[in-house]
Image (cartoon, grey):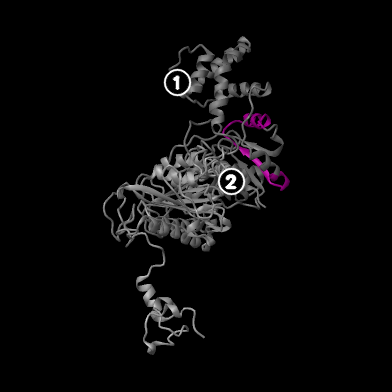
């Protein structure tokens, strides 16, 4: 039989017949499974459609200087001369490259179910010609895509050359491509996928409130640009929306007719609907994270980009590797955002803040930014068999600002009316008690030492903790709770957690520096109703001792009739947790709530952390 490829015969020398199944002498490139064919292909034929010669990830360093193979940080790539083609040839090459990239992403599981897309632009001011923007279409199988499916646009998002298949629609990501071009002028290629690794990486924070994912001390951090191995890579996270785009003027349509067709209207509604979009969030993080070469979309996927298609692809692959690493590390109990404490090279952080003095107990504290602790994504070891749970109040069950912003102002505002409700003899006893507090606290800057109102307001302003004042505050708060002016703040996770503890035989106890009476008032008049029936015992500093001293926890264990090792103690105070640990408390656990004192580096390593009391509820 005569081979159908016989017409490709390259030589008339009959002595070379029968070298292949074609019975003709074809160039070795057409026989990649032969040794010579492989040598010919892999020695000079690249697999990807090329737009320029000699690309390399190593271009300029982060400081703008030329990089080399030993550079720690690389900010841009490098390449040789463009492959010279006319405008039609260039367009054909870019379209084919986009189809090839989409097929590659599908095979790697990054573009399944018609998801994902690629955008590449060529030209621009450096080449003294307008930009030509090529965009993959939406809603087609990426592994079956061809160059003829790709749109060509200008920088105003007008369609210059539509796909040959008239039913193709632009990607809903198109507005986001142009936002990236706006904020990253050097970018020429953008990739969007629904990678499962990217999606899972956005869920490492169980609260789903994290604004970014941080990764450090992984070699592939170097592959994403602007970062070295031991830098902390921070990838911004935005929340998902029903569609990616933003409303656009109706003239940016791919219809070449004067009147809009039904298909065009459907396209506009789908791609640029007026509902919730990603665009505003996207623009915000692009401005906030100037070093970022990617943006994660929670429960969705990732966008990544580069100054060439090769760099975009390289950086995207590095990001996906890091996302998978982060997810797998979490399964092992290793936190990818934490600097290793030992066992690997690292440069000590000389700027590590010293441990802060913590104001704990039922006394309140000033406003503190502990957002990094809230977003640290740590999952603690949860004790499922413990039957005695000891809870702090402030920073644990209740906002640390509740006392400072609600209870204390209530006293200052209503003290005059309270004093007027007392009999003269009661006023005299209270005044002497408060004067004794002033003497003990060495306070002398009082406007009118004979005025109860002046003394109380000054002591509250100075955050003085004294017996006479606390007794009076307790009485005022009792009246406020009973007349409905005060509602005790508790976090929304407390009531369901208490129900779970009760149904599983876990006894819950409260230990706070505030008096037992104040504790019961707060929980008895909480924003979720009366919760006092859920608590077995209340402890304060008068019943058990100072919360920062180990013997206090021994006293509590003795009162409960159990070994300290059987008790779970939750607090926002490192000093209290250390004292509990010293006393032999089995499970000292750090509670992380908004406004809590920032956790020191030592505290992060020593104690497991929870963001909700529901994390203590086992299966």
Location of residue 37 in the rendering, given as x and y in whole percent from the top left corner: 40, 78
In this rendering, position of residue 170 left or right of residue 474: left
Q: Residues within 10 Å of mark 2 (few under 14, many from 20)?
A: few
Indicate yes or no whether the magenta region holds residue 503. yes
Residue 222 in picture, x, y percent from top left: 38, 56
Task: Give SS at disc 2.
Answer: helix
Q: How many marks?
A: 2
In reply to whether residue 203 is colored magenta, the answer given is no
Instruction: Tell me which corner region of the image, top left, top right, bottom left or bottom right, holds residue 194.
Output: bottom right
Image location (x, y in percent) of residue 340: 42, 55
Number of residues whose C-alpha sits closer than 10 Å to that of mark 1, classed few (under 14), some (14–19) or many (20 or more): some
Question: Which label sits on residue 443?
Answer: 1
- Secondary-structure class at tag 1: loop
Q: Residue furthest top?
A: 424
Q: Nearer the viewer, residue 312 or 247?
A: 247
Q: Which mark sits nearer the N-terminus, 1 or 2?
A: 2
Q: Which residue is mark 2?
A: 263
Q: Is residue 52 visible?
A: yes
Can residue 342 be seen in the rendering of this structure? Answer: no
Using the image, determine if residue 55 lies above or below residue 567: below
Q: Is residue 194 above or below residue 409?
A: below
In the image, taking residue 561 as reference, residue 196 lies left or right, namely left
The mark found on residue 524 in the picture is none
* Residue nearest the viewer, comparing 328 with 226: 226
Which residues are drawn in magenta?
500-527
Give how far apart the Cα atoms at labels 1 and 2 are: 79 Å
Q: Residue at x 40, y 83 (%)?
A: 25
Relative height, residue 342 to residue 18 (above, below): above
């Amino acid at each position: 039989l005569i081979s159908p490829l016989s017409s490709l015969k390259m030589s008339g020398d009959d002595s070379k017949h029968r070298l292949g199944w074609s019975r003709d002498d074809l160039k070795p490139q057409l026989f990649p499974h032969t040794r010579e064919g492989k040598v010919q292909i892999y020695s000079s034929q690249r697999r990807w459609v090329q737009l320029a010669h000699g690309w390399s990830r190593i271009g300029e360093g982060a400081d703008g200087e030329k990089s080399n193979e030993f550079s720690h940080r690389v900010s841009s790539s490098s390449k040789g001369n463009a492959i010279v083609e006319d405008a039609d040839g260039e367009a054909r090459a870019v379209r084919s490259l986009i189809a090839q990239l989409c097929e590659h992403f599908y095979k790697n599981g990054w573009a399944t179910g018609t998801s994902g897309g690629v955008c590449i632009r060529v030209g621009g001011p450096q080449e003294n010609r307008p930009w030509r923007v090529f965009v993959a279409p939406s809603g087609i199988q990426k592994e079956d895509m061809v160059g003829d499916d790709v749109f060509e646009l200008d920088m105003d998002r007008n369609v210059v050359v539509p796909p040959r298949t008239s039913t193709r629609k632009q990607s809903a990501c198109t507005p986001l491509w142009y936002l990236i071009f706006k904020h990253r002028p050097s970018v020429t290629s953008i990739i969007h996928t629904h990678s499962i690794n990217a999606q899972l990486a956005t869920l490492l924070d169980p609260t789903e409130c994290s604004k970014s994912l941080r990764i450090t001390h992984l070699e592939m951090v170097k592959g994403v640009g602007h970062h070295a191995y031991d830098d902390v890579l921070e990838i911004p996270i935005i929340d998902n929306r029903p569609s990616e785009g933003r409303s656009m003027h109706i003239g940016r349509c791919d219809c070449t007719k004067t009147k809009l067709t039904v298909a065009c209207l459907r396209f506009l509604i789908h791609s640029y609907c007026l509902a919730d979009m990603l665009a505003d969030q996207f623009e915000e993080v692009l401005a906030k994270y100037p070093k970022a070469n990617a943006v994660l979309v929670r429960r969705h996927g990732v966008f990544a980009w580069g100054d060439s298609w090769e760099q975009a692809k390289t950086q995207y692959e590095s990001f996906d590797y890091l996302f998978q690493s982060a997810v797998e590390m979490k399964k092992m109990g290793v936190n990818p955002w934490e600097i290793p404490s030992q066992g690997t090279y690292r440069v000590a952080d000389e700027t590590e803040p010293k441990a802060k003095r913590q104001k704990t107990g039922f006394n309140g504290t000033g406003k503190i930014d502990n957002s990094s602790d809230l977003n640290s994504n740590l999952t603690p070891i949860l004790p499922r068999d413990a039957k005695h749970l000891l809870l702090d109040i402030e920073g644990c069950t209740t906002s640390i600002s509740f006392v400072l912003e609600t209870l204390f102002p209530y006293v200052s505002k209503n003290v005059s009316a309270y004093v007027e409700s007392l009999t003269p003899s009661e006023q005299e006893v209270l005044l002497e008690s408060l004067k004794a507090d002033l003497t003990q606290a060495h306070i002398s800057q009082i406007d009118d030492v004979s005025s109860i109102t002046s003394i109380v307001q000054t002591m509250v302003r100075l955050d003085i903790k004294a017996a006479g004042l606390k007794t009076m505050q307790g009485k005022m708060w009792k009246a406020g709770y009973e007349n409905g002016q005060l509602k005790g703040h508790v976090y929304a996770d407390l009531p369901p957690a208490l129900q779970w503890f009760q149904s599983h035989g876990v006894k819950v106890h409260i230990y706070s520096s505030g008096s037992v009476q104040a504790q019961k008032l707060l929980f008895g008049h909480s924003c979720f109703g009366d919760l006092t029936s859920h608590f077995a015992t209340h402890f304060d500093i008068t019943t058990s001792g100072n919360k920062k001293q180990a013997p206090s926890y021994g006293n509590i264990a003795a009162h409960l009739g159990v070994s300290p090792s059987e008790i779970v103690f939750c607090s926002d105070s490192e000093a209290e947790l250390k004292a509990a640990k010293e006393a032999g408390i089995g499970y000292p656990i750090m509670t992380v709530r908004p406004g809590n004192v920032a956790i020191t580096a030592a505290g992060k390593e020593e104690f497991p952390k929870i963001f909700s009391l529901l994390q203590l509820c086992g299966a």
